Image (cartoon, rainbow, N blue to C red):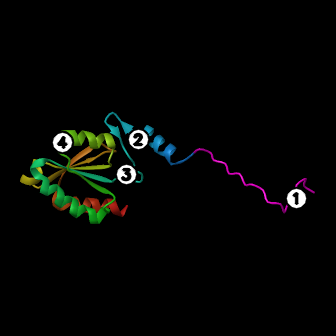
Amino acid sequence: MPAEDPSALSTALMGCYGIGISRIIGAVAEICRDKDGLQWPEALAPWTCVIIQSQDVASEGEELYDSITPILGSDNVILDDRQESIGFKIHDAKRIGYPYIVICGKDSKTSNLFEVIKRRTGETDKVERSKLLPLFQELNSK
């Protein structure tokens, strides 16, 4: 027979091994980075895509945001409309580590081309607007 009464109430103790969300984020930040900044995996990224617009083509960036948001969801797309230079915004986006960076610059207005940077691979592609939405539909289906 146990020394204590088995039917008596006792305080339950809970242990923790210290593997929480903050440690996972820290580990990902340590492993998934390069000289330019973080490279978030799509599953953990705060946003999947950032749209950077220059001051000249603000309406293009907003239209693109409105067309991508229904595909990826409003919680996966962010529009960088700060009053900063486009180079500053691109550098900032690379440091933050968005998986996909879409740049609306002068080419967007004149030749309907958007620059897409895939952060994990470092690839930079010029994509026509008509092919941009299918690209994000394909990403969303994965």
Q: Is residue 87 magenta?
A: no
Q: Position of residue 90 (x, y in %)?
A: 23, 42
Which residue, given by chain and number where applicable, does mark 1 sit on?
5
Judging from the image, what secondary structure is the residue with disc 2 in?
loop
Q: What element carries label 3?
A: loop
Q: Distance between the residues labelled 3 and 4?
A: 22 Å
Foreground: disc 4 or disc 2:
4
Main secondary-structure element of the magenta-colored stretch: loop
Q: Which tag, 3 or 4, sits closer to the chain's start?
A: 3
Distance Cα–Cα, label 1 vs label 3: 52 Å
Three-letter code, disc 3: Pro
Q: How far apart are marks 4 and 2 (CA)?
A: 27 Å
Q: Which amino acid does label 1 sit on?
A: Asp
Residue 9, magenta (yes or no) = yes
- The three-letter amino acid code for the residue at tag 4 is Glu
Marked residue nearer the N-terminal end (3 or 2): 2
Can you identify the residue that label 4 sits on? 84
Of label 1 and label 3, which has the lower sequence position? 1
The residue tagged with tag 1: helix, strand or loop? loop
